[in-house]
Amino acid sequence: MILNAAMSLDGKIATVSGDSEFSDEEDWMRVHRLRSEVDAIMVGVNTVLADDPKLTSKVGRSPMRVVVDSMARTPPTARVITFMRREVPTIIAVTGKAPAERIEDLRKAGANVMVCGEKGKVDLEALMEKLFEMGVRTLLLEGGGNLNWSMLERGLVDEVRVAIAPVIVGGSKAITLVEGEGFSKVSQAVKVEFLGVEKVGSCLLIICKVKREADDRRNETPSET
Ligand SMILES: NC(=O)c1ccc[n+]([C@@H]2O[C@H](COP(=O)([O-])OP(=O)(O)OC[C@H]3O[C@@H](n4cnc5c(N)ncnc54)[C@H](OP(=O)(O)O)[C@@H]3O)[C@@H](O)[C@H]2O)c1
């Protein structure tokens, strides 16, 4: 599972008014190439409502699209469903609390609605299992900040790729790369290992691997005793 995002130097993935256009042309091409290399792309419903993304690839095959949406708030007219609907399937992952009529409307629009969990938020582990059963082995998580938190907190992310745009936008209410409750201690944080950094257009692309506890143990120096 790869988490990919573009953010400002101060860590925002959208401005206070919801503008999320941090990538330049070259970075977008990188994202389109990455999309064509994975089995599925996943976003949270707020990203669909804010940006109305198509989530397809301009440079190769477009993988399956997945929207994490407890209450089936995705509009049936959203481009993630309507754009290339015959060629590119879209899954809307909801909970048992999603209104039946909204589910029906989404199905009529061509989406594949999957119930993952009974109440609260979408059960991400259940969703991952269903996607695995459908043959998804590589998944690209494209935000936003709240879904990024849920996936990271559950240990469901293996790699993070962040394009840092050379801008600072500020705003205490602007969405950051990772939202949610947060960890209270640095020692509890999700730890990453920096694998590489490169210039892509005007952005700085940082690629990191998420470290597992087992990796830490392997790297520990054996004790003298
Ligand atoms: N620059 C970038 O690379 C980039 C990329 C993506 C998005 N964005 C920006 O990010 C903003 C949206 O981010 P966001 O944090 O507000 O929303 P988000 O992560 O896109 O969506 C979060 C919503 O997903 C639903 N959800 C269902 N199950 C969930 C679960 N287990 N964990 C987390 N969420 C779950 C919840 O709504 P329900 O309770 O209704 O289900 C939740 O409020 C937009 O402004 C967008 O433009 C930027």
Image (tube, grey):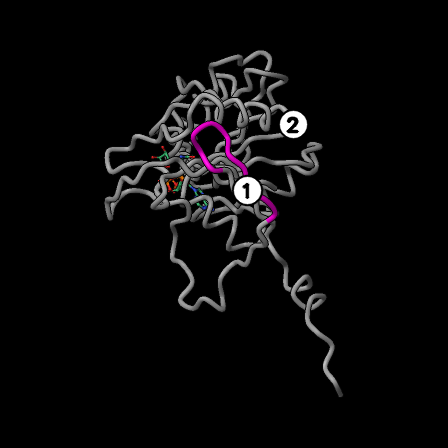
Report the amino acid beneath label 2. Glu
In the figure, 138 relative to 109: above or below?
Answer: below
The quadrant where ligand 1 appears is top left
Report the amino acid beneath label 1. Val
| Quarter of the picture holding the N terminus | top right
Residue 198: image x %, image y %?
A: 54, 37
137 left or right of 79 in image: right
**Magenta span dominant secondary structure:** strand
In the figure, 215 relative to 54: above or below?
Answer: below
User: Between disc 1 and disc 2, whose residue precedes?
Assistant: 2
Residue 38: image x %, image y %?
A: 64, 30
SS of the residue under disc 1: strand
Residue at left 50%, top 55%?
153
134 left or right of 174 in image: right
Extreme-bottom residue of the structure: 225
Residue at left 66%, top 36%?
138
- Residue behind mark 1: 197
SS of the residue under disc 2: helix
Residue 159 falls within the magenta-colored stretch: no
Q: Mark 2 and mark 1 in contact (Cβ < 8 Å)?
A: no
Quarter of the image holding residue 133? top right
Of the pair 31 and 173, the residue shown nearer to us: 31
Residue at left 42%, top 62%?
183
The CB of the residue at mark 2 lies under 8 Å from ligand 1: no
Of the pair 182 and 193, the residue shown nearer to us: 193
- Residue behind mark 2: 37
Q: Which residues are magenta?
A: 195-204
